[in-house]
Image (cartoon, rainbow, N blue to C red):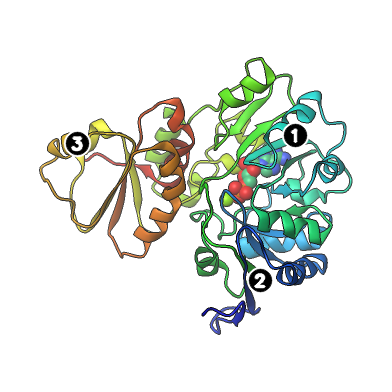
Amino acid sequence: MRSPTRTRSDMKTNEKVTRILIVDRDRPDAALIDCAASIIRRGGLVAFPTETVYGLGANASDPRAVAAIFEAKGRPSYNPLIVHVSDLEMAWSCVSNPPAVFERLAPRFWPGPLTLVASRSDRIAANVSAGLATVAVRMPANAVARALVEHSGVPIAAPSANRSNRVSPTTAEHVLKDLNGLIDAVLDGGPCALGVESTVLDLTGSIPAILRPGPISAQAIEAELGFAIRDFEPLDSSREQAFKKSDHQEQLIDVGRGDIAMKSPGTSAVHYAPRTRATRIEAERIGSIEWTGRVGLLVLGDHPIDLLLERTDRREVPAVRIDLRDPVAAAEAFYRTLHEFDELALDEIVIVLPPDRREWLAVRDRASRAARPYQIKT
Ligand code: AMP
Ligand code: MG
């Protein structure tokens, strides 16, 4: 049997011993939650499960604790964090003068994977928002996350619990792979239910605008509001151009989408990349793949796979082929599969993009940011 509190350290590069607190996903042990909450109150870092991905949390009112998140992740200081709350009252304390749509959407979609951006209150440290006057807030549905915020008694700023630009973690093991020894504790509540980050909705303009597509769709928000909002605009061809001009990932991080990139810096080009070289290709171009080395093929979407492979010069893929046919299941499995592929010492991961349809928007977006366009050799 696994013991509920294990401790473990990595002797090589790390300074801290990261405590692993194993809790039940639906009914977390109050003593372990209290232990994690006291770390938060003391200004420490605790990773915890949400229904989307694992978050790396710190007290959102404490600028030093927040700075430690950026340091542990190696996250650029211009990329703001989402603040997690346990009830509506706490949410109101994080924002100043929330617009009427905020008060309408919060009770309807919370707890759940919708993040609302509004004016930031003084309760929230400025570095949470990377200097912006706004703050992104959400109430997670996961019982462990809610209990942690509630027991801490403070709003918790938490980005995904991975090193910057790496694949988001959907299990405690993924978190430890990146952050063991760099954080104080991880609450291990098992795998995340949704597996793709929350929808981010900007409420500071005259029309609500989706800055990051996610599990809650524009249609669902429009159905509640009774009027049209600005849907997410996918990566455009000018960004593909920018990829082609340079092969160096770091230089690509800032190739943004104009206004949205400035409003929501985390939406920059390459963001969720695995360590293995990863490329993406539209399904109809699969015939152009050159099968050199061990290639993992990750097929997203309801493409007729056999027809797809017939367009190539082979029936079998050198290493692994995974088909994720349904948008919800694909979102849940996408990062997990990338983590698994990353362990296989492949030469390349080729992601076949899902169809360009609304229900695939969030998955297409994450896939586009995990991988650069497949370079077709001419
Ligand atoms: P992560 O939790 O790592 O997935 O990143 C959180 C993302 O939320 C950021 O990268 C931004 O895209 C978005 N975000 C957080 N705060 C704000 C804000 N104040 N305004 C707009 N977008 C935000
Ligand atoms: Mg992230």
Q: Is residue 89 left or right of residue 350?
A: right
Q: Establish if 327 lies above or below 159.
A: above
Front in this rendered view, residue 144 or 288: 144
Residue pointed to by mark 2: 185
Q: Label 1 sits on what residue type?
A: Pro
Farthest residue toward the bottom?
Answer: 11
Q: Is residue 30 left or right of residue 2?
A: right
Q: Label 2 sits on what residue type?
A: Ala
Are the residues flagged by discs 3 and 1 in contact, CB closer than 8 Å? no
Q: Residue at the location (88% across, 48% down)?
A: 123
Q: Which quadrant does the C terminus fall into?
A: top left
Q: CA distance from mark 3 to mark 1?
A: 44 Å
Front in this rendered view, residue 217 or 94: 217
Are the residues flagged by discs 3 and 2 in contact, CB closer than 8 Å? no
Q: Position of residue 128 (x, y in %)?
A: 75, 50
Q: Establish if 141 lies above or below 75.
A: above
Q: Position of residue 18 (x, y in %)?
A: 63, 75
Q: Residue at the location (69% across, 61% down)?
A: 69
Q: Establish if 32 lies above or below 74.
A: below
Q: Which mark is residue 308?
A: 3
Farthest residue toward the front?
Answer: 27
Q: CA distance from mark 3 to mark 2?
A: 45 Å
Q: Which mark is residue 107?
A: 1
